[in-house]
Image (spheres, helix red, strand yellow):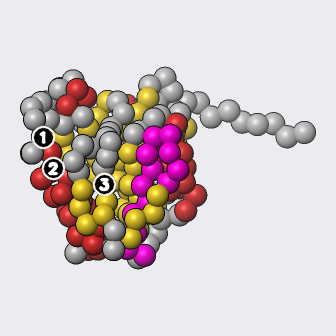
Amino acid sequence: MSAVLEMPLMTTEQLLAMPRNGMEHWLVEGQLRERPMTIRNRVHSRIMVRSSYFLESWRTGQPEPRGLVLCGEAGCRLSRNPDTTVGIDVVYIAANLAIQEAEDTTLIEGIPTLVIEILSPSDVIEDIKEKIDFYQKFRVPLIWVIDPHDRTITTYRLDAEPELVNIRQELSGEPFLPGFRVAAAEIFA
């Protein structure tokens, strides 16, 4: 019988103090996950800009108070004790979460309304599945996984089966982003 080594739980503060050394780091229930840093290509960057643009356009049409659209590996602490902290390609946080954030804070503290993960050529399917699983565990209402290669978007809604949207269809944020609709092809333009 082999012994299982218990790794000490890490906090978000310890995670943020780590040297970057070419590695991407995130915490899942206090356990460090790391992999070589992904170099984002122009397709990934373009999709990040396009999806952020459409979300921001929708957001500005919403009544006050409004939430926030953030992008570029926005840091988000989904839970504490043990900490789950990740970087998200594009995220929308509701107004009630946005107003709790202090100006000097570096992290989103809480559950975002929408998480967008844009696949990169170096992404490992197991890592993506793990992220989706813990987003769902922490009850993120809406998750979009954008696949630039296949030009599809897989939508995960709270307590529903995943839906695959292709470039001939419309991407909807209902019911969590009321009125948000865009032709999926526009995300990839």
Stretch in magenta: 150-162
Contact (Cβ within 8 Å) of mark 1 with mark 2: yes
Q: Compared to 27, does 97 lie above or below?
A: above
Q: Residue at x 32, y 30 (%)?
A: 109
For this view, does 188 lie left or right of residue 30? left
In percent of width and height, residue 24 lies at: 42, 54
The quadrant of the picture occupied by the C terminus is bottom left
Tag 1: residue type? Gln
Disc 3: CA contacts within 10 A as few (<14), some (14-19) or many (>=20): some
Q: Nearer the viewer, residue 180 or 45?
A: 180
Q: Residue at x 18, y 40 (%)?
A: 68
Disc 1: CA contacts within 10 A as few (<14), some (14-19) or many (>=20): some
Q: Which residue is mark 3?
A: 172
Contact (Cβ within 8 Å) of mark 1 with mark 3: no
Q: CA distance from mark 1 to mark 2?
A: 7 Å
As drawn, the label of residue 58 is: 2
Q: Closer to the observer: label 2 or label 3?
A: 3
Q: Compared to 70, does 97 lie above or below?
A: above
Q: CA distance from mark 2 to mark 3?
A: 12 Å
Would you say residue 75 is visible in this rendering?
no
Contact (Cβ within 8 Å) of mark 2 with mark 3: no
Tag 2: residue type? Trp
Q: Residue at x 40, y 49 (%)?
A: 143
Q: Compared to 170, does 32 lie above or below?
A: above
Q: Residue furthest right?
A: 1
Disc 2: CA contacts within 10 A as few (<14), some (14-19) or many (>=20): some
Circle nearer the N terminus (2, 3): 2
As drawn, the label of residue 62 is: 1
Secondary structure of the residue carrying tag 1 is loop
Tag 3: residue type? Ser
As drawn, the label of residue 140 is: none
